[in-house]
Image: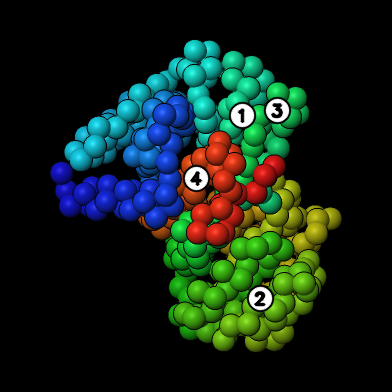
Amino acid sequence: MAKGFFMLIDKLFKRVEALGLNLEGKTVLTEAASGAYVVTPLLAAIAGAKVYAFTRTTRYGTVEEIFANTKKLIEECTCRKLDITLIDKLTPEIIAEADVITNSGHLRPLNEEKLRYAKDSVVIPLMYEAWEWREADMDIGYIRKRGFRIGATNERHPEVDVFNYLGDMALKQIFDAGITPYKNRFVLVCNNDFGPHIAKVVAKVCEGLAVIDKNENRDKYNFPNVEWLGNFPEVKVPAEYKDAEAVIFTAYPFDQDWIGDNTSLDIQQIKAEIRDPYILRYCGDVDEKVLDRESVRYFPAHVHSGHMGVLPSAVGYDPIIRLQAGGLKSAEALITGKHEHNNISVLELI
């Protein structure tokens, strides 16, 4: 197999070792997925778990394609036999066997229909940070009723460290949108923790970055080439940014319409402040019909409600390896009650 697969397998083992991830004797129900997310069942199995990896056909790939790609990677792991069973049907017996059920895309929503078969001791890692919680992902009322332990991943733990890929993702979106940071100015409109991580990378390679965020976050933008403009959601742009190449937009809750008519960020206000605005949809919903009506450009052309317009997987395997390993570490912490690794918490209880 190509050298890249060898290096990928090596990265999986190194991440399990770095986190001290240990799922020996546990059964993990997770997803088999396309692209970089193919690593999830392998990480759990390398950590010692018996793994059931469920998939289904989506716009990202067919069951057959996902199974083939996952098997190919499993076969490259010649140094250890991995206990991974690929499935395309969720049976009551498999759900009942699981000690861990990950809140992964193919398994969502985690509702009563599925979880009624789960053992009382099952744990559910969110696989993302607590503030990114999406109600549509799971039936929290039923989870509380059953007493299942649930926890979110600390993505900023030094051995997870997913947030430091956010700037790379912003650059990837800029290039994919057909523009370049070099000699161009940008406006970052933000109300969440992503902003400073985006700013410190983008500001290094563009002509200038103006930031609109909540006033409480102002001190987090102490980077060269960054200009603070004011308090989110008010959009006031000085003359030198009227012709900004694009607006990098990130707002939470992700499934709320932020840009449109009578929204927090009114499209008329944006058009009054920026000539020919180009909205880069990093995360947060926009009203596409209103933007089309107003001839305002945006990228990507469509984003499913509540989803990011650019994913960590867009910049390669590394952030996904770290994210999924961190999610599995939070599952281990829920099982053992040991919530710290290297004296830093790996999860937040939900």
Which badge, 3 or 4, is on the more N-terminal residue?
Answer: 3
Mark 3 or mark 1: name the one nearer the start of the chain: 1
Label 2 sits on residue: 220
Mark toward the viewer: 2 or 1: 2
Determine the residue positioned at 49% across, 49% down: 326
Amino acid on which disc 2 is placed: Lys
Q: Which residue type does callout 1 highlight?
A: Pro
Residue neighbourhood size for the residue with mark 4, other residues' Cα within 10 Å, grouped as few (<14), some (14–19), many (≥20): many
Secondary structure found at label 1: loop
* Tag 2–tag 1 contact (CB < 8 Å): no
* Sequence-wise first label, 4 or 1: 1
Q: Which mark is residue 329?
A: 4
Q: In the rendered view of the protein, which quadrant contains the N terminus?
A: top left
- Tell me the amino acid under the disc marked 3: Gly
Secondary structure at numbered mark 3? loop
Label pair 4/1, CB-CB below 8 angstroms: no
* Mark 3, residue position: 147
Foreground residue among 269 and 322: 322
